[in-house]
Image (cartoon, rainbow, N blue to C red):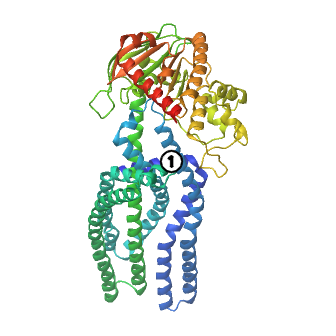
Amino acid sequence: MTALTSMRGMLRIAWRTSPRKMAVSIVLMALGGASWPMLALALKLGVNAALSGDTSGSTVAAAFVVSGLIGALILQHFAYVPYAEATEMATIALEAELVELANTAPGIEQYESAEYADKIELLKKGMAEFHDGMLGLMSMVSLVTSVALTGLLLVFVNPWLLLLPLAAIPPVLASQRAQRIVNRAKEESAGATRQASHLFGMATSARPAKEVRLFRLQAELRRRHASLWHAVGAVLWRAERRAALVEAAGQLVFGVAYVGAVLLVLRDAVSGHAGVGDVVLVIVLAVQVNQQVTAALDLFRKLQRMAQGMTRLHWLRQTVSAGTGRAATATAPDRIRSGIRLAGVSFTYPGTVKPVLHGVDLHLPAGSTVAIVGENGAGKSTLINLLCGFYRPTAGRILVDDVDLATMSPARWRARLATAFQDFVRFELPAGQVVGVGDLPRRDDVDAVHAALGRARAEDVVDRLPDGLATQVGKSWIEGVELSGGQWQKLAVGRAMMRTAPLLLILDEPASALDPQAEHVLFERYAENARRVGEESGAVTVFVSHRFSTVRMADLIVVLSQGRVTEVGGHSDLMARDGLYAELFGIQARAYAGEATGGADS
């Protein structure tokens, strides 16, 4: 039933994509499928006419044999021309749906799920199976026509011969059983397959190449990659052997029936109940039935694989539907009047049991600049993700002017955010669009892009490019200009500055690739921009930085430790308390002092 449901779904997609091409293909495939049985019938009539000395009958039969042979050889090939185009378009439509589904969920919780990662990996790898399955569907038109006419001709020779096509059922059932065995093995080894693909990417990509060579990891990568594929191969090989035995048993049943059918007609011919033409007809039809069974087995394999892919796609649709079924319709305010408040916020990542944030109570005043500091793993990035609405708190609420963020439309809230993440994306586009996509409606507004670059202190990056904003960047393009890590980061910050009136501006280590002095200058510019947007819209600017010379410029400093807020206040207040902030500040100050002394001594 799953295969039939998948078949209907794929046919609907293909028909919707190109109905005219599908109609032409179906007619041609049906005629091609009818050609082989008609060829067998023409051979029977020709043999009988020849034995009886009927010259004109033999000539007509020969003409039908030639016509049937030509039709059988060329009609299906002509049918595949329009159908292949429709199939390509349908496969592209499926890929587009997969892209849409992967990006429809308002949050990013699904990316924390191993099940989601495995199914997405199998779906991506299975796009070729969708294509093969679509081609198989058209083969079914020809196959069904051919089987129906073959069965009809066999009945006229001897009703018992109708059992011959029925003997194809055991091989088909065996094939389905074999495919299920293989599919289970693929599901079982999906995790290891994904890990092996990751290692392959590390070994063949430019970004990790330096560390791979520096730490002499080449042999270790090869060893782990080979070990994973050996484990995957062992699982799949066991499954393939079991599947082959099951299929062989099904084929054996048909082989016995095939021999029995030929012997039955020979007996009738010897007893005078059938002619020589009938013997020729049955032998040819029996060969065709064998070919039909082989084609059916191959078709069922394709349909089973396609059904598995459609099942995963259905699972993804349900997962996304469940994730989007949030009653979140409130609009973002025009301006923030009181601020953003976290009330008892705790958070645990999906699939884990240890909370990352514990009972966070925090008020971020409207128009303020807030620095979040803490050691690695303290929960800084998690707090940023919650403020962006990528996750919902496990407990507690995030309030924007007393409106629960959970009730607010994620799209409308994010339309009022401006963010520069530490793990920024390197969009391989013309440089102007790398920045411009930060405010999509103004993507090609040159003045807006230059203004954003100015606010980000990133004009120098574009000035050095051969064609300025029109320069294609990224290694994926032959003519693409590759940028340094710092240059990419500056463009990412420029992207965050495209929105001129955000309610929340988030800068997560936006200058980690810059030296301390350059970062300090950059944050002075940020502070100016923060004051401007704060006055206009009450915007809150939140930034994360490990450099305390920058942090001290914030109106409010929030110190996180092991998922809890331990200190909140201005720089002077926190230094006076002599707590964790003062300790961390002192450690860094002494480190910088040591560097300065060392530089002077040298």
Task: Decide if residue 103 is on the left or right side of residue 453.
Answer: left
Q: Residue furthest front?
A: 601
Task: Decide if residue 138 is on the left or right side of residue 224.
Answer: right
Q: Residue furthest top?
A: 338
Seen at 43% across and 25% down, the residue is: 590
- Binning the other alpha carbons within 10 Å of mark 1 as few (below 14), some (14 to 19) or many (20 upward) gives few
- Expressed as whole percent of the image width and height from the top left, the position of residue 56 reads 58, 86
Seen at 33% across and 67% down, the residue is: 168
Q: Nearer the viewer, residue 212 or 17?
A: 212
Please tell me in which quadrant of the rendered image residue 327 appears: top left
Q: Nearer the viewer, residue 600 or 505?
A: 600
- Expressed as whole percent of the image width and height from the top left, the position of residue 417 reads 53, 22
Figure check: 248 above or below 318: below
> Number of labelled discs?
1
Under circle 1, the secondary element is: loop
Of the residues shown, which amino acid type is indicated by label 1? Arg
Seen at 40% across and 82% down, the residue is: 278
Seen at 56% across and 78% down, the residue is: 64
- Expressed as whole percent of the image width and height from the top left, the position of residue 469 reads 70, 37
Figure check: 138 above or below 588: below
- Can I make out residue 164 in this image? yes
Q: Nearer the viewer, residue 361 or 211?
A: 211
The residue pinned by badge 1 equals 207
- Expressed as whole percent of the image width and height from the top left, the position of residue 205 reads 50, 52
Figure check: 160 above or below 208: below
Please tell me in which quadrant of the rendered image residue 66 appears: bottom right
- Can I make out residue 318 in this image? no
